[in-house]
Amino acid sequence: MSCRSLRSLAFLAAGFFATGCQEGSPPTAPVEADLDLQAAITQAGDDAARSGDTERAEALRHGAKALRWGIRPSQIEIKIKNETFTYLALVVGVVRRGHGEPALIRSLVAWTGRPPTALFHVISKSDQALFGHPGGNGNGPEGARGQWKDLVNQEIWVATAGSADLELAGTGDACPGKPAGVALRCVVAFYDIRINGNFQLVGSGGPDGSPIEIHTESDGVHGVVITPAH
């Protein structure tokens, strides 16, 4: 059985990932801290928390942590409104144990500009999931959620249809910059992503409220897997 086929079984059986399934080069580097970026992602998380979206708030805050802990983002191309833009991206996977089998909640965080002019964020609870209406129209427990924030024009676009594939492709060593006192385990990781979604402007309706299509596809995107220490 291939390393890629074994990774989910190893995750469920052990609750954490060994380094045997490494793929690609280490996604870490002692780069200068991008404080503008960290502030923008943290602010997006705070905005989500104020709106009551605790899941999105936690995912964005973990994204800011991953940057502080030395994860080097990957460069990806995102097609928006039939134009292709270069974004930097990372994927954060957080293990949730709950009452049943452990689940990996994965979150793509991507941005462009310095300081950031746009943020793209997708959350999924499985390798492959469908976007649904934000009001819960058939989105189910395994559904995906997506949001594109145009920071220049102060617009928020939310995914209403389409699909999101965020598949864990491999793991590596411990996150190099995580403080010793933090009660979390963190390993570097690689993800294969395929996003194809229709996004609706929040607050829009009628003929002027037509959705836009957002697509991206990339393998080996850098990221992390975070689990509780106990």
Image (tube, rainbow, N blue to C red):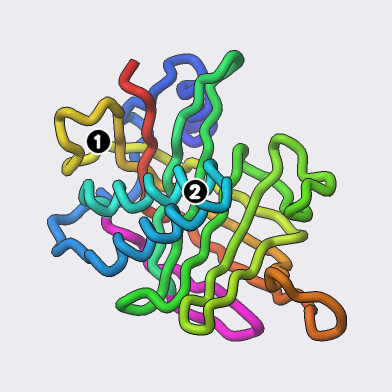
Residue 29 placement, left or right of 211: left
Q: Does the magenta stretch include residue 82?
A: yes
* Residue in the picture at 30% in, 47% down: 65
Q: Main secondary structure of the magenta part?
A: strand
- Figure check: 17 above or below 171: above
Mark toward the viewer: 1 or 2 = 2
Task: State which quarter of the image contains the C terminus.
Answer: top left
**Front residue of this view, candidates 137 and 220:** 137
**Label 1 belongs to which residue?**
173
**Label 2 belongs to which residue?**
49
Q: Which amino acid does label 1 sit on?
A: Asp
- Figure check: 63 above or below 195: above
What range of the chain is rendered magenta? 72-86
* Residue in the picture at 49% in, 73% down: 77
Residue 68 placement, left or right of 117: left
Query: x, y percentage for residue 212?
Result: 71, 76
Residue 174 placement, left or right of 41: left
Q: Is mark 2 on a helix, strand or loop?
A: helix
Query: x, y percentage for residue 12?
Result: 51, 20
Query: x, y percentage for residue 144?
Result: 66, 48
Q: Distance between the residues labelled 1 and 2?
A: 31 Å
Q: Is mark 1 on a helix, strand or loop?
A: strand
